[in-house]
Amino acid sequence: MTQALEVLMLLLGLSILGVALLGVRALLQRRWDRGRTLCLIAVAGGIGCGVLPFVLASGIASSSADPAAKARLLAETVARLMNCGAAGLFALPIGGVGALVSLVGARRSRR
């Protein structure tokens, strides 16, 4: 079950990183609204890639009755899923900076 979640997190992280890079590409082409939208989606996805492993791991660890085994399983699952979702976490600052650049660029082009 955790292998399927690892693949899911890997695909989610890579797709969020792809959205962030599409947003940066749109900003380079001076398409401010499209770039801002894609970058904000990347920020939300990056936050999701950071939160989702904890939610999934707590659901997996809740099946264990022993508190020590539960804590160990929770830590191992979170570590594995965070490694797989690292690309999505990398998209978080890219999207944030891209959204700020789009706001400044749109404001300057209106003047």
Image: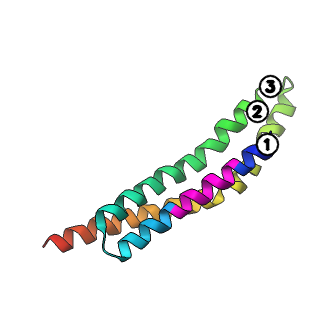
What secondary structure do most residues of the magenta stretch adopt? Answer: helix
Which mark sits nearer the N-terminus, 1 or 3? 1
Span highlighted in magenta in the image: 8-18
Identified at 12% across, 73% down, the residue is: 111
Q: Is residue 89 above or below residue 76?
A: below
Q: Are marks 1 and 3 in contact (CB under 8 Å)?
A: no
SS under mark 3:
loop
Q: Residue type at mark 1?
A: Thr
Q: Which residue is mark 1?
A: 2
Q: Is residue 33 magenta?
A: no
- Foreground tag (1 vs 3): 1
Quick one: which residue is furthest to the left in this view?
A: 111
Location of the N terminus by quadrant is top right
Q: Are marks 2 and 3 in contact (CB under 8 Å)?
A: yes
Which disc, if any, is residue 60? 2
Identified at 55% across, 62% down, the residue is: 17
- Foreground tag (2 vs 1): 1
- Left or right of residue 49, residue 70 in this image: right
- Of 71 and 9, nearer the camera is 9
The CA distance from mark 1 to mark 3 is: 14 Å
Can residue 78 be seen? no
